[in-house]
Amino acid sequence: MSAPPPRARLSRAVLAERLPGYLGQALLLAAVAWLGWHAVANFLANVRARGVPIGFAFLHAEAGFEIAQTLIAFGPASRYLDAVAAATLNTLLVIALAAVFSTLIALLVAFGRLAAHPLVRAAAGAYVEAFRNIPLLLQIFFWYFSAIALLPAVGDSLRFGGALLNNRGLFLPRLQASPAGALALAAAIALFGVLFVTVRRRLAARGAGATAAAALAAAAALLVALAPLAAARGELVLDLPRVEGFNVGGGVALLPELMALTLGLAIYNGAFLAEIFRAGVLSVPRGQVEAAATVGLHGVRAALLITLPQALRLALPPAAGQYQTLAKASSLAAAIGYPDIMQIVGGTVLSQTSQALEAMALVVLLYGAINLAIALAANLANRRLLRREGR
């Protein structure tokens, strides 16, 4: 057994050269620690002098207010902790909707800027230059105070299939399920996933083309076949929105604040994502597109099967940063009264409890956790892409 190699030691000359830097860092760290300790001690002394309670025990007290839109049951008798949960879910909802719509817009604009037709390129370029240079808050105000305010009243609601649109918001159908219906729907979704994976693997083993599309079609056929069976027995009921006097009954409502915030975030961030995706597409070697054309792949099929998978690897890191920017910009919801984390926790809860430090600490922690989750998801997706390339 060979002896471990001796540890390298710094020479006196190197140590003398680095010592001033080490001392400077130590002094800076000591100064920061002293300032932090002094600030905490001063805060605690002021809190004790004024008799203000500290801590998070207030989260278990009764909230005593209502929230206009919640994804969970919430009322005046609910706790402040429930209000934090409802506000967090509202924030996640607007982030998810804006991320999906901004991605779709960005893909269309990115390929539009690369199109052969000059009018399409000019329109896509005008979109990018216009919307990324207009302040986001101004765009949100435009959608909320101008565009959505011009929608018709409840009595003259616009109907799109089973949905209603008016100045009170967008009202969508809601699926109501009994326990048996919910169990049947969950079983159908599980079978959908199992069948999709099984069919795709078998088709891939046989070398069949378009395995994902074929597996998706087969699994969707099973789900479509099972869902009407449960609906026929009355276990699944579609609750359609309907006009009832001056109100809308049934369905699920999306507030005008949510619509304006989603539109503003999606259109603004879509302009930045479009440039990121365009750069990723341009990074794909021209030979890959030409090779796709030789095997009969053109247009949309070539873009989806050849160009996008390769462009995604390079576009994913900067796109993840833009999605984090979108998540942080969602805090502008407080400007139009949408009940998100900033509005509820940093506004209503703070004003009612007078515990500003704890409320703002919750706001910081929640937004930090959301952005860290986005970064983690992007890192996992990037690792998967690299693993597919054998790196």
Image (cartoon, rainbow, N blue to C red):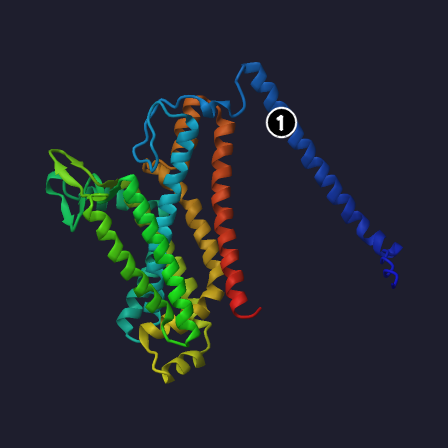
Judge from the rendering whether residue 26 lies leftward or rightward of residue 301; answer left or right. Answer: right
The foreground one among 378 and 229 is: 229
What residue sits 16% from the left and 51% below the top?
A: 161
Quadrant location of the N terminus in the rendered image? bottom right
Query: Eyeballing the image, is 316 above or below 63?
Result: below
Image quadrant where one finds the C terminus: bottom right
Residue at image coords 48%, 24%: 355
Q: Is residue 286 left or right of residue 216?
A: right
Residue 45 point in image, percent of width and height:
61, 19
Residue 258: x and y, percent? 30, 42
Kindly identify the residue that appears in the image at 51 percent across and 33 percent down.
361
Q: Is residue 133 visible?
A: no
Depth order, front residue of 252/229: 229
Residue furthest to the bottom in view is 294
Q: Position of residue 277 (x, y in %)?
A: 41, 64
Residue neighbourhood size for the residue with mark 1, other residues' Cα within 10 Å, grouped as few (<14), some (14–19), many (≥20): few
Q: Is residue 76 above or below residue 98?
A: above
Q: Is residue 316 left or right of residue 89?
A: right
- In terms of image quadrants, where is residue 169? top left
Instruction: Please state which amino acid type lies under the numbered disc 1.
Output: Val
Res. 91 in view = yes
* Residue named by callout 1: 40
